[in-house]
Amino acid sequence: MDSSTIIYSLDLFGVAVFAVSGALAAGRKRMDIFGVVVLGIVTALGGGTIRDTLLDSGPVFWIHDPAYLLVAVAFSLLTFFTVRMLTAHRLALLVSDAFGLAIFTAIGTAIAFRTTDSFGVVVVMGVMTGTAGGMLRDVLSAEVPLVLQREIYATASLCGSCIYVALKHLGFSGIACMATAVAVTLAIRLAAIYWSLSLPVFDSEKNIPDKEEAE
């Protein structure tokens, strides 16, 4: 199996797990089957769509290859019919989202390298591919996006994308870069979930005296 086939298979797997993530989020909000499919598609395809649009690299990936759309719809429906009688636990949502985040971060970084040699742009596109779909999912399901919460989320994606860029600069193969990026992103995100790790919070109110104290 050549590298392009591996990357394509990994990309479809990422679409599948992110579609499951979106469908689970829809289930937590008790959406109907149409809402489940829409949220699954948006979660699975949103980040890559924004990436391809900004990079202006030709047709958006799922328009160029409708298999991505079919996989997103299929796994959204599969989740609806297999999980709808059960409670969609937040942990299941977080874990499936973590796999999607790791895979899409690596895929997005690799695709960006085909269009630009700017390391900064490549990293931004990698992080965007990994996080944008989840952000759209959370907004549509009336939740505060994970990327804006204390949880280590975008930071995990950033680390994975930076690792990819560093290894690429050192001359490692694309497959090695991708595998390492996926492993690093996934490990950081799962560790954050398991140990409830978070970044420091900027609480400006602590440094602003109350009106009565100021007087």
Image (cartoon, rainbow, N blue to C red):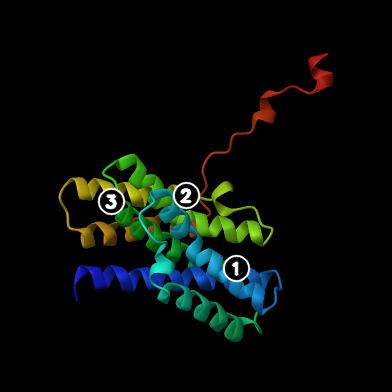
x and y percentages locating residue 81 in the rendered image:
60, 86
Please name the residue shown 43% across and 65% down the image. 99
* Amino acid type shown at disc 2: Ala
What residue is pinned by disc 3? 113
Of labels 1 and 3, earlier in sequence is 1
* Amino acid type shown at disc 3: Phe
Disc 3 secondary structure class: helix
x and y percentages locating residue 185 in the rendered image:
38, 56
Q: Is residue 182 visible?
A: yes
Disc 1 crowd rating (10 Å Cα; few below 14, some 14-19, many 20+) is many
Please name the residue shown 67% across and 24% down the image. 207
Of labels 3 and 2, earlier in sequence is 3
Q: Quadrant of the C terminus?
A: top right
What residue is pinned by disc 1? 39
Disc 3 crowd rating (10 Å Cα; few below 14, some 14-19, many 20+) is some
Marks 3 and 1: in contact by CB < 8 Å? no
* Distance from the alpha carbon under mark 1 to that under mark 3: 29 Å
x and y percentages locating residue 26 in the rendered image:
64, 70
Quadrant location of residue 65? bottom left
* Distance from the alpha carbon under mark 1 to that under mark 2: 20 Å
Please name the residue shown 36% across and 46% down the image. 123
The image shows residue 36, relative to residue 185, as above or below, that is below
* Front in this rendered view, residue 58 or 166: 58
Of labels 1 and 2, earlier in sequence is 1
What residue is pinned by disc 2? 154
Q: Is residue 92 left or right of residue 85?
A: left
